[in-house]
Image (spheres, rainbow, N blue to C red):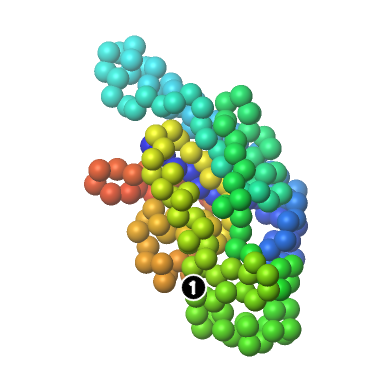
Amino acid sequence: PRCIWLTRHGESVDNIVGKIGGDASLSTRGRRYGECLSRFINFQRQENEKTRRLEVEAGMAMSPQREKTVAVWTSMLTRTKETVEQFDPKVYDIKHIRFLNEIYAGICEGLSYAQIEQLYPEEFEARRVNKLFYRYPGMGGESYLDVIQRLNPLIIELERMTSDLLIVTHRVVLRIVLGYLMDVDRAKMPEMDVPLHTLYCVEPKPHGTVVRRFKWVE
Ligand code: F6P
């Protein structure tokens, strides 16, 4: 795509209490982030169209002709779906994709880090020592490497696309996709700082990838 927009979902009620995993809904703040996000992306889309139109009128069209619909991909989880509730489905092609779900924490789903440390001190330590390789115990439990693996087909698809794309996902998936696009060593991905309510714009250019970061001001 010409521009890949990436963000985590708006703040969830579990984010407030520090619980990991689960399928929580957005908090009031999180909903407001979703509203702001839809207005901001709309604004960007209209600005691009306006620039292109003015260039055509002036006989100097050089900016890329963008496709009419913008693709929006979320995970299958409630908090990402709720984040894009304000997007007009006539303008945005919205898809919910299981590959974009957050890392599955197995027996640690729904716990806080403090609870994990207390209940499973050895697991907590093992993860601290090697976060990239550490796989959560329990059925379906994943590691960062597992998530990198499941994201592979999606990254291939992403590189093939020519339209603009917005991805609304979760902390681990965002670290991996952004890390991949920015050529970050996978060993460094688990420590990347990707706060909530922050939007990244990644533009692949001939001379390298340009990344811009937008922070929501409440
Ligand atoms: O707390 C939000 C969250 O997305 C959890 O669902 C997930 O387990 C965690 O962040 C991942 O972050 P880290 O890999 O740093 O524990």
User: Where in the figure is residue 202, as x and y percent of width and height?
Assistant: 41, 46
User: Where in the figure is residue 113, as x and y percent of width and height?
Assistant: 67, 75
Question: At numbered mark 1, what does the secondary structure look like: helix, strand or loop?
Answer: loop
Q: Note whether 101 is above or below 105 in the view shown.
A: above
Nearer-the-camera pick, 184 or 18: 184
Q: Note whether 83 is above or below 184 in the view shown.
A: above
Which residue is at 48% across, 61% downward? 149
**Residue at numbered disc 1:** 132
Q: Is residue 207 left or right of residue 114?
A: left
User: Where in the figure is residue 54, as x and y percent of width and height?
Assistant: 37, 17
Which residue is at 42% across, 59% downward? 179
Quarter in which the N terminus is drawn? top left
Q: Residue furthest front?
A: 139
Which residue is at 63% across, 28% downward? 89
- Is the residue indicated by label 1 positioned so its CB lies within 8 Å of ligand 1? no
Kindly tell me whether residue 44 is visible in this rendering: yes
Q: Is residue 143 left or right of residue 58?
A: right
Q: Residue furthest left?
A: 207
Q: Note whether 52 is above or below 137 in the view shown.
A: above
Which residue is at 41% across, 67% downward? 186
Task: Residue 42: name its quadrant.
Answer: top right
Kindly tell me whether residue 212 is visible in this rendering: no
At label 1, which amino acid type do we have?
Leu
Q: Note whether 94 is above or below 100 in the view shown.
A: above
Q: How many marks?
A: 1
User: Where in the figure is residue 33, as x and y percent of width and height?
Assistant: 64, 45
Judge the density around disc 1: few (<14), some (14-19), many (≥20) Cα neighbours within 10 Å: many
Q: Is residue 101 left or right of residue 71?
A: right
